[in-house]
Amino acid sequence: MTTSLQPLNVNPVHKFARLSLASIIITAVFITIHHLYKLGPPALILGSVIVASGVMLLRWFRSTKGIIPLILYAYG
């Protein structure tokens, strides 16, 4: 008898959503580093806004399953 270590309610969409969010965070880190010399400390605000908007839009989409948050997340 084999047992699975994964929870029964794992949705593959959540895996790809996490990977998408990770790519946004990595991109925001590189954007922040790139703009740090020219903008100085406000570049950290730029990076924080990018990350926060991605997280908020993804959470909004997960809670509502609506098309508007999905479009904003995809093109935002």
Image: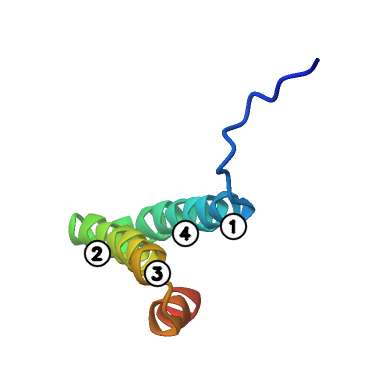
Q: Secondary structure at mark 1?
A: helix
Front-most of residues 75 and 40: 75
Instruction: Please rate how many residues cluster around mark 4, counting C-alpha atoms within 10 Å: few if below 14, some from 14 to 19, many from 20.
Output: some
Q: Quadrant of the C terminus?
A: bottom left
Which badge, 4 or 1, comes first in the chain's sequence?
Answer: 1
State how far apart marks 1 and 3 are (Cα).
Answer: 12 Å
Front-most of residues 52 and 62: 62
Tell me what residue is drawn at x 59 percent, y 57 percent: 13
Find residue 13 and name its label: 1
Per the image, the residue denoted by label 4 is 24
Q: Is residue 69 left or right of residue 40?
A: right
What amino acid is at disc 3?
Phe
Q: Secondary structure at mark 4?
A: helix
Q: Say which quarter of the image contains residue 32.
A: bottom left
State how far apart marks 3 and 4 are (Cα).
Answer: 16 Å
Q: Is residue 16 left or right of residue 4?
A: left
Whether tag 3 and tag 4 are in contact, CB under 8 A, the answer is: no
Tell me what residue is drawn at x 36 percent, y 71 percent: 64
State how far apart marks 3 and 2 are (Cα).
Answer: 32 Å
